[in-house]
Image: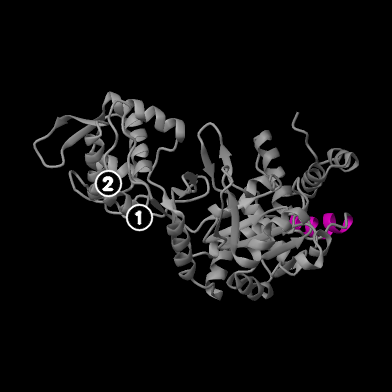
Amino acid sequence: MEYLSHPPSSSPQAAPPDPAMVQVAEAASLPAAFLTDLALRHFSRLGELKLVQIAQHLGLPVSAVDGLLSNMRKLGLLEVPRRGDLEGDVSYALTDAGQRLARLAYEKCNYVGPAPVTLPEYVARVGEQSQHLVPVRAARLQQAMGDLVINPAMLPTLGSALNSGKTIYLYGASGSGKTYLAEHLVKTLEGHVQVPHAVYVDGEVIQVYDPVVHRPAPVAAAPAQGLAREVPLDGRWVLIERPVVIAGGELTLEMLDLTYDPHTRLHIAPPQMKANNGIFVVDDFGRQRVSPHELMNRWIVPLDRRVDYLALNTGTKFTVPFDVRVVFSSNLAPEELVDPAFARRLGYKIHLVPMNAASYRAVVAQACTRSGVPPDPAGIDYLVNTLHMRNLMPYLPSLPFDVISKIADRAQYLAEPPRMTPELLDWAWANYFGGNDLLAQAQTSPTFKLGE
């Protein structure tokens, strides 16, 4: 590994590695030249910085960064425009030579953030955090289900599937609650994990932390540091809730590989890498622009061997952990999507069937509460016994809110209290499912008011 920093264009041939810089590189497990470029970009973007500030931005110990800044001063890249009375109250800024090299550093890569972790560090941390995953128990699963109306007989299957670590395939008719169930399953994950801001692989930076996907865990407020000589935590990592990534019909094969931005010269981690130590939900499986066969071909090795193969834009290939609980959700039965060899890798295949009348009434009551429409026994009977029977519609848990919320929408428009009458249920049903005959019939009812 080369520990020489880039000398300014006006300086003579660089001397052998400074022992302090060797110590810095070893502390970060990164080449000293890379750390120097990263520091140059920070100073170029932020201007004058103190030792503790640049250490916080780099996510490295102050003692290690002190050696980095000392070496940059020796190379003529930094100067000290002002110095306070206290130890550590020193401000650093780029020299003209430092500004020139900062521009060159931006040409190599636009990454400005905490120092990346190395690939071996990332692999080791994911493995450690996998071992600390708490098994799902019955009480925890029931708590995660919350107010979800579900057949109690399904709970042991769901709990077993989660603990197995194998793929879960939820399938059933549209509106049977697959996505809603998947969203509740993710609540079974307990504990916090650490995800790196970025990973360094063969001279390239891969951004992993995604504030859209990763939710920082609540932590106690850090004490005021003042001129403290150490940063309390390893700033290269972010403590988060176990990650949950949900992808739908927009998922493509390209999204499962590293994304390279030629403008920033950065790689972005694929969703399954962002989901490590967590859950990856593939919603509406079978409706992606790419065929299920192609998607399963891409996933067959990760699902079997728990590792994924990625490639940099330079052609360098490497492996990363695939420590992800994968949940597929689809309207289609497994045999309609993939051949038996692929279906075998779908560890648990769970069929969500329509509800019975009693469970459906409980969902209707929840929909009334959620939409602000007072539940009316006669209206509920009409919805359950008449509308569903007349239209041969099974009791699907997504329907009550979708229908009843339309009554609330209409009441708001007319500035009147919402009422769950048969006439308004006919109108809401017709507007939800379509059908001009049904809508005309509802609107010509003697008790129906257009509000015009």
Please, which residue is most extreme toward the top here?
A: 96
Residue 330 position within the rendered picture, expressed as x and y whole percent measured from the top left: 74, 57
Toward the viewer: 111 or 75?
75
Q: Secondary structure at mark 2?
A: helix
Q: Nearer the viewer, mark 1 or mark 2?
A: 2
Q: Is residue 147 visible?
A: no
In whole angstroms, how far apart are the C-alphas of marks 1 and 2?
33 Å
- Whether 10 is among the magenta residues is no
Q: Which numbered dot is residue 14?
A: none
The residue depicted at 49 percent of the width and 45 percent of the height is 207
Magenta stretch bounds: 377-390
Q: Nearer the viewer, residue 440 or 102?
A: 102
Type of amino acid at the residue the image marks with label 2: Met
Q: Which residue matches tag 2?
A: 21
Image location of residue 64, percent across then percent down: 26, 49
- Res. 434 image quadrant: top right
Q: Residue at x 56, y 46 (%)?
A: 312
Residue at image position (71%, 64%) is: 169
Quadrant of the image occupied by residue 442: top right
Asked whether residue 382 is drawn in magenta, I would say yes
Kind of residue at disc 1 = Val
Residue identifier under label 1: 219
